[in-house]
Image (cartoon, rainbow, N blue to C red):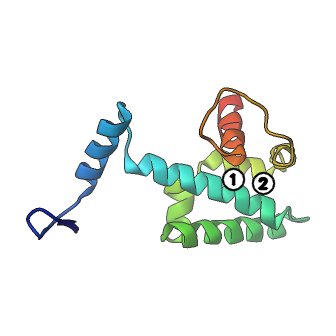
């Protein structure tokens, strides 16, 4: 519910209204789910960086579950919902085959002017991952 200060009444805000608002302010078709997925993917990347790699297949599976639990806590969903809908599968796959390490190392690099204004270093890395795979 949203409070309308002019009428002092509450108005329902549903996903259609939110998505219309996003389209109006951005000038392009986008939905709240895009932002949710972006946040889930970014938070998974950061969680994987924080918890490091496992030495065995079992350890890797446990660390994936642990990272997804962190994402779920952040997004207010279950681990399985986050894995299925809000974390890009490429991030999980790259973690499982230990290919994210080069991107983790890039977190420490000095930020260069790459023409992508308004993004954090972590977000720029996610964009690079998505563009190169």
> Label 1: how many residues lie within 10 Å, few (<14), some (14-19) or many (20+)?
many
Q: Position of residue 104 (x, y in %)?
A: 82, 50
Q: Are marks 1 and 2 in contact (CB under 8 Å)?
A: yes
* Number of marks in picture: 2
Q: Which residue is mark 1?
A: 92
**Secondary element at tag 1:** helix
Q: Who's the residue at 84% across and 50% down the image?
A: 98
Which quadrant of the structure image shows residue 2? bottom left
Q: Nearer the viewer, residue 3 or 61?
A: 3
Q: Is residue 12 above or below residue 103?
A: below
Query: Helix, strand or loop at disc 2?
Result: helix
* The residue positioned farthest toward the right in the image shown: 55
Quarter assignment of residue 103: top right
Is disc 2 surrounded by few (<14), some (14 to 19) or many (20+) residues within 10 Å?
some
Q: Is residue 69 above or below residue 105?
A: below
Quadrant of the snapshot with the N terminus: bottom left
Percent from the top left, x then y, of residue 35? 47, 49
Q: What's the distance in space between the residues labelled 1 and 2, CA to CA?
A: 6 Å
Give the x, y percent position of residue 100. 80, 47
Tell whether 20 sits left or right of 30.
left
Which residue extends farthest top? 115
Please report the residue visible at 84 percent of the width from the left and 43 percent of the height from the top: 106
Residue 71: % across, % down: 60, 65
Kindly identify which residue carries mark 2: 96
- Left or right placement of residue 70 versus residue 5 in this view: right
């Amino acid at each position: 519910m949203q409070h309308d200060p002019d009428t002092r009444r509450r108005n329902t805000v549903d996903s259609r209204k939110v998505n219309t608002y996003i389209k109006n302010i951005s000038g392009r078709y986008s939905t709240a789910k895009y932002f949710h997925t972006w946040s889930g993917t970014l938070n998974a990347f950061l969680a994987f960086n924080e918890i490091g790699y496992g030495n065995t297949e079992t350890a890797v599976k446990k660390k994936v579950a642990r990272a997804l639990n962190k994402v779920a806590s952040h997004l207010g969903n279950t681990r399985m919902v986050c894995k299925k809908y809000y974390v890009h599968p490429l991030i999980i796959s790259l973690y499982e085959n230990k290919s994210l390490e080069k991107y983790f190392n890039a977190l420490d690099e000095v930020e260069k002017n790459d023409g992508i204004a308004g993004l954090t270093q972590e977000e720029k890395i996610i964009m690079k991952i998505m563009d190169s795979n």
